[in-house]
Image: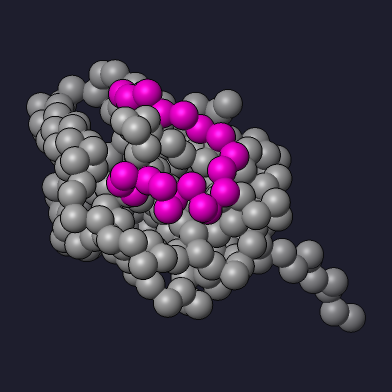
Amino acid sequence: MTKAGGEFAPWNGVFETLRVVQGVPLFMAAHLRELGRAMSALGFSTDFDFDQARAQLPKLNGRWRWIVTPEGTRTLFTEEEWTPTEPLELSVSAVRVGSCNWDARFKTLSYLSHAQAWKMKSTGETILLNEYGLMASAARANLFWRLKGQLFTPAHESGCRRGVVRAFISRRHNVRSGHFPASDLLEAEEIFLTSSMKGIVSVGAVKGRTYKRYITADELREEYEEEIARQVADAQQGIHQGHETSPGFEMP
């Protein structure tokens, strides 16, 4: 007599990806909050000691991934050197995401829409629209643009992840989030993307329009690199204070 198998649900999990510099995971508390939001939405819990796992990271640069499923929690570190990314060309994907979908708003293991958009892209990055034809995010990044001195980004409710670097920018600058059509990008004075691994990446072209100056992105990159240097220096001195470097696991 064979034992009945459990439910086959490979989609049922959440993850976070952290950039690690000299053994220091960046924005760890912010990533813990985002993991907590995703876990809460899917009904997960974990008693995994992320602080202990951090202490065991090698003093290298790389990518640290957390994966939480109903079966348990695990982490995976991969050594990886970060190199600056040249300005990318941007296009709009035929793939759509649901504005209310968990796989759009959270980093779930059900990542197929974003992976499909990335696989099908004809440019360096591509924008995903939601079911209303409004911008959600890029395939592997969040999206910002500047118009008449104002920064804009799609709202979380449009179908994008909150994003740790996205939040870093929004805390320090006046950013207007909302529901925007892709045509707004054609009026933009500057466009850039954000992600934990690549930081802030300028867009050099979209639908035939080219950009030669990246004033806002250059300023933000300088602020971002200063924050990275501060976090690394604090960690090396044994200082774990402030919301950016606090190791505590925070559920929403």
Drawn side of residue 14 relative to residue 79, left or right: right
Mark yes or no: residue 89 visible. Answer: yes
Q: Position of residue 9 (x, y in %)?
A: 71, 64
Mark yes or no: residue 28 visible. Answer: no
Drawn side of residue 170 relative to residue 225, left or right: right
Asked if residue 179 is among those painted magenta in the image, a careful observer would answer yes
The structure residue drawn at horizontal position 65% and vertical position 54%, both measured from the top left corner, is: 133
In the rendered image, the quadrant that contains the N terminus is: bottom right
Asked if residue 134 is among those painted magenta in the image, a careful observer would answer no
The structure residue drawn at horizontal position 23% and vertical position 42%, both measured from the top left corner, is: 217
The structure residue drawn at horizontal position 58% and vertical position 26%, both measured from the top left corner, is: 252
The structure residue drawn at horizontal position 61% and vertical position 50%, both measured from the top left corner, is: 134
Can you tell which quarter of the image residue 123 is in? bottom left
Please tell me whether residue 58 is drawn above or below residue 234 in the rendered image: below
Please tell me whether residue 105 is drawn above or below residue 151 in the rendered image: below
- Render colour scheme: one colour
**Nearest to the observer: residue 175 or residue 235:** 175
Q: Position of residue 72 (x, y in %)?
A: 57, 51
Magenta part of the protein: which range?
172-191
**Nearest to the observer: residue 219 or residue 102:** 219
Please tell me whether residue 137 is drawn above or below residue 91 in the rendered image: above
Drawn side of residue 78 relative to residue 107, left or right: left
Q: Position of residue 165 (x, y in %)?
A: 35, 39
